[in-house]
Amino acid sequence: MHELNLNTVDWTQARAFLAAARLGTLTGAARELGLTQPTLGRQVAAFEESLGLLLFDRVGRSIVLTEQGRAIADILDPMQPAFEKLGLFVDGQRDTIDGSIRITASDVISAYILPNVLIDLKRVAPNLHMDVVATNDVQDILRREADIAIRHSRPTQSDLIARKVADTTAGIYGAPVYFRQNGVPDRLEDLSQHRFVGFGPISATLSFLEAMDIGMTLSEENFSVSSDNGVVAWQYARQGMGLAFMADDIGALFPEMVRLNYEELDIQFPTWLVSHRELLSSAKFRFVFDTLAAAFDR
């Protein structure tokens, strides 16, 4: 029988096993932990070997917990918050500005706002590696899927710290070629006769406009094309495929795009920087957090 020595259990391997158990794929677990798939696979295999147990059955590209694997996962899962807190504490005590840091933001912010900020960061901290998670989904800061998040809503969890860095305005933009072909709408009500490019779910946009109650009536028929990727949708608008809602700080980067100005249309939303409270005692994380805040303030 395999004799287990708890003093030799590698908790990095245990964390890899838990991520794989929760997500059901090595690829997804590797992405969550910021590892390559082969590295995570080796960690899981080493954990199985250290226990002397088969924890997963491989079914095609997926992995399924064995009965023993489910039992081990149930035992280890309550320890996961302690592992995360330990990692946060250790990271927070480091005073050097090097290593890795993961920032998550929308694809539009990642493409158009962050580049200049990252150039400034690299100039001061050349040994700092920055991993940008460009997604419109909310990343889980508490589980360390990202170290710093740029969000448009304030989190409520007590373990997180948030700083409001901007009150962002937005408007409706169109390309000159669109207006040459379709004319310029003089009034807000005229927009119901125009085509739009949708960012993300069209139903969410329509619900937002309905809540504003400004007399602007659009339907799904107005959106001739849409994309979950904001950069792609904005490019479609630049090509004249339709009008588009866009934050003014992004729109200002494209002087050829024409902003429609209506007194009734006043779109505003906040921008927040979010991180784990314990991380900001670290020189590295504080430096990046403050640099991002200063960039948005500018």
Image (tube, rainbow, N blue to C red):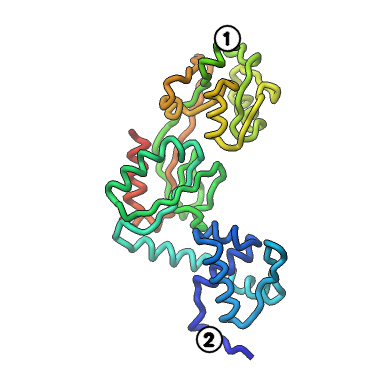
Is residue 185 something one can see in this rendering?
no
Residue shown at 46% from the left, 64% from the top: 85
- Residue type at numbered disc 2: Asn
Q: Quadrant of the C terminus?
A: top left
Provide residue 226's location: percent of width, then percent of height: 63, 30
Q: Helix, strand or loop at disc 2?
A: loop
Residue kind at label 1, given as amino acid type: Gly
Horizontal and vertical percent position of residue 154: 49, 42
Q: What's the distance in space between the residues labelled 1 and 2, CA to CA?
A: 76 Å
Position of 17 compared to 104: left or right? right
Position of residue 99 relative to residue 264, above or below, is below
- Relative vertical location of residue 224 with respect to residue 132 in this rendering, above or below: above
Determine whether the residue tagged by mark 1 lies in a helix, strand or loop: loop
Residue 225 in the image: state x and y as whole percent: 64, 27
Q: In this view, does 16 lie to the left or right of 221?
A: left
Q: Nearer the viewer, residue 261 or 194?
A: 194
Q: Is 190 in front, or is 34?
A: 34
107 above or below 84? above
> Label 2: few (<14), some or many (≥20) within 10 Å?
few
Q: Name the residue under label 2.
A: 5
Marks 1 and 2 close (CB-CB < 8 Å): no
Residue visible at 68% across and 62% down? 62
Disc 1 packing (10 Å; few <14; some 14–19; many ≥20): few
Q: In this view, does 209 lie to the left or right of 270?
A: right
Q: Residue at x 41, y 54 (%)?
A: 101
Q: Looking at the rendering, in which quadrant would you find the N terminus?
A: bottom right
Choose top left, top right, bottom left or bottom right for residue 137.
Answer: top right
Q: Earlier in the sequence, mark 1 or mark 2?
A: 2
Residue underneath mark 1: 183
